[in-house]
Image: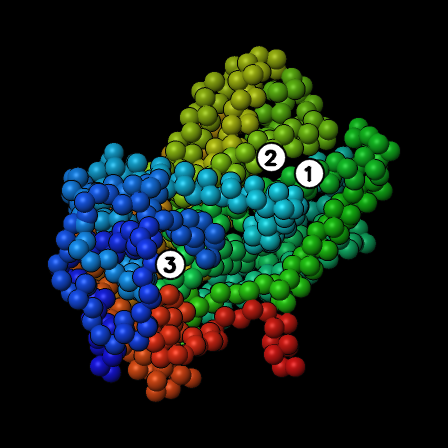
Amino acid sequence: MTTNQNFANQFIHHSNEPLGLRQAQAADAQAGVREPEPEPEPQAHFSEPQAHFSEPQAHFSEPQTQLPTRDSTNGNMSDNTRFSNGVDEKVNGNGKDISPVELSHVPTHTEATSERAFSNILKPPDSYTAEGVYWADLPFGQRSSFINRQCLSIWREELINIGRMTYRDPFSVVGAYFSTHVINGLGMFVEGYTLFSVGNIKSLFKSSYPACWKTNKVCNKKWMDAVDYLEIIGIIIGQITVGLEGDWVGRKFGMVQDAAVMTLGSVMLTAMWGTTLNGWVICYAWSLFVYGFGVGGEYPMTSTRAMENHGGRFSTSTGDRLHRGRNVAMAFLMQGWGQFFNQAVLILCLLIFHHGSMMQPVSTVATQWTFRVSFGLIAGVTLFLVYYRLYRIKYASEVLDETKQRLHTSGYDIRSLKLALHHYWHRLVGTTVSWYANDFFFYGAKIFTSVFVAQITGSKDAPDSLQETWLYNLINIGVSMVGYYLAAFLIDHKAYGRKWMQANGLICMFALNTACAFGYHKLNQPGSKIHWFQFIYFMTGFFTQFGPNSTSFLLAAEVYPASIRATCHGVSAASGKLGALTPSIVYNYTTGPKENFQIVNFFALLAWFVTLIFIPDTTGLDLREQERYWEYVMEGRGDEYHGVAVHPRHLSWYERFVLKRHLAYNPELDYQQKRDELRSIYQSSITQYETNQKDLTLQQRDFFESELGNLALKERGLDAPIRRDVHESKLADVEKGL
């Protein structure tokens, strides 16, 4: 126990000198250009406090260049350089320049490594300067410089890696993209493919079955409306149900279940039939309900898995802080690819089965083959998704499991949900209302597609023209894809981020549709203002994706603790689908398109207002720090937390100006708390390891997998314990049994 205490004290005595943590890194770099010294035995480092760390530090004669290291998780540059291209900026806590420092004694390699490992846990280098200043505490100019250097360094490193991969194997880049982003977002792909096909094939059904889909002479009008209603109701039920299951049973169960239900739904859609046209419509509606349930579950499951797929509390991986938003956005944008491929497949199938033409009328045989082949193709994809999620995907469940273990929760965390409704009710208002209003605008505006197409083509017959509607819809999806990718590119940029991307996208959508509302009579004249209408039609889709459609999917999961993350995301997403359903009801009581444009604009403005007031900006915030704050709240001492989770930058306007939670932020006190917490974890982990390794908690196992924990184990000649909470796949279980 003495050794444990010595080690802990050695690396935690800097309570009054936080800058000492970064000085060791500079010294480590300096040591790299000197003659190498014999490396001491690890035992000496851990068994005795070193004089170097216990005495005040002297000063450098010159600024030292630090050598970059690589992050073992994602291959990006670890920020020993602080993204400074060789020379660190010397900035104190107030953002003022300070003189360079020098050390009278250069630590050994083992000492510096341990100090760096300790420092990187408490103050990750991608979020703190070399002097230990949080990036959001820097003055505007220095903050911008820090952010830009960081982004340029990451992008440069990624481009270099892409170049190397391309040189070795040109197809390896494509393979890496598919394995990293396409597979994660495959559920959203099949969601976009099938869900948006419902609107696409309506034009086809109207052409082949006008007595049913146009005049409702042989089909019941209520069941025709039920095609849309049951689809959305199924999605809503799936979002809420699977969201609860994801937090209760686990992420793996929810993801496998979603894929299985979507497979069943797609088979039903492919094989749907009826003795009458009305019976066929009824079968169609219920098939969409089943499929919609699986689709709904994809929302909370895809978002939570994409954002929680990172290291534990003591990991130095930059993936969570620097790439969390991009990972989620890249998974979500597969929805756009699903829409694109669905439209392309429908066009191709119709050309094949309709004698190479898209001219109307379309025969019933061609229609039957077209929509059944399109649904059958996606049934194969969903079946593959079942296999892949069951046997191949690695499920990083430690985030949820560790949270439940620390909070002493088994089963569903009712206590966290109740407390969250009290502590975070304003965030829930922000994510639900903004998503509702955004989907009201998005789906409400889609109703005007025929108006836009008619204006662009200069033909009043365009709304009933398959060729015109489908081709322009394909172009619109292509423009939207640019918005998807641009959102993924900038969503993690600390100077812009998700909150302002959502707010700016909404205000642009409001401005575009306001032009339509006030200039409707002029713009609606075929042949006039054609270019303006083209611009509005395409740019509305662009800013929807480069804005609220991408960000709402991320924020609805990101702003909540892990124990209730899937639940809150499911509720927020369900609210969005209610917004998608509402326009079709409201428009029954309006006088015409001009009034509809005005109503849609109001909801865009509402979403913008709610975003500014109630949604926090979590760009650059370590979610593990958010979990730490939630642990304080659960223990009834939330006012004792002083970390970056209550930094003004990461709070909503309501939390800052009404609740004033930012007043608790104090980096010095927070450093002391984290130091003491780490010392306690270190001591308890070593003691438990020596007593009974089998009963290690998930947090203790996570500690031993970190660089600091590994150094502690090396002193004793021990190996890190095997993590048992990560379930790789069903196949892995079978292999272990054999």
**Quarter placement of the C terminus:** bottom right
Mark 1 is surrounded, within 10 Å at the Cα level, by few (under 14), some (14 to 19) or many (20 or more) other residues, namely many
- Name which of mark 1 and mark 3 comes first in the sequence: 3
Residue at the image position 38 percent from the left and 58 percent from the top: 316
Location of residue 207 in the rendering, given as x and y in whole percent from the top left corner = 76, 34
Mark closest to the chain's N terminus, 1 or 2: 1
Report the front residue among 618 and 735: 735
State the residue in front, 196 or 303. Answer: 303
Q: Position of residue 631 (x, y in %)?
A: 29, 66
Residue 647 is tagged as none
Residue marked by disc 2: 477
70 with respect to 447 (left or right): left
- The image shows residue 222, relative to residue 472, as above or below, that is below
Local crowd at mark 2 within 10 Å, few (<14), some, or many (≥20)? many
Looking at the rendered image, the disc whose residue lies closer to the viewer, 2 or 3, is 3
Q: Is residue 199 left or right of residue 77?
A: right
- Residue 737 visible: yes
Of labels 2 and 3, earlier in sequence is 3
State the CA–CA distance, disc 1 to disc 2: 9 Å
- Position of residue 148 relative to residue 8, above or below, is above
Judged from the image, the secondary structure of the residue bearing numbered disc 3 is: loop
Q: In the rendered image of this protein, does residue 367 appear above or below residue 10?
A: above
Amino acid under label 3?
Thr
Q: Which residue is mark 1?
A: 343
- Residue under pointer 3: 316
Residue 662 location in percent, x, y?
A: 20, 50
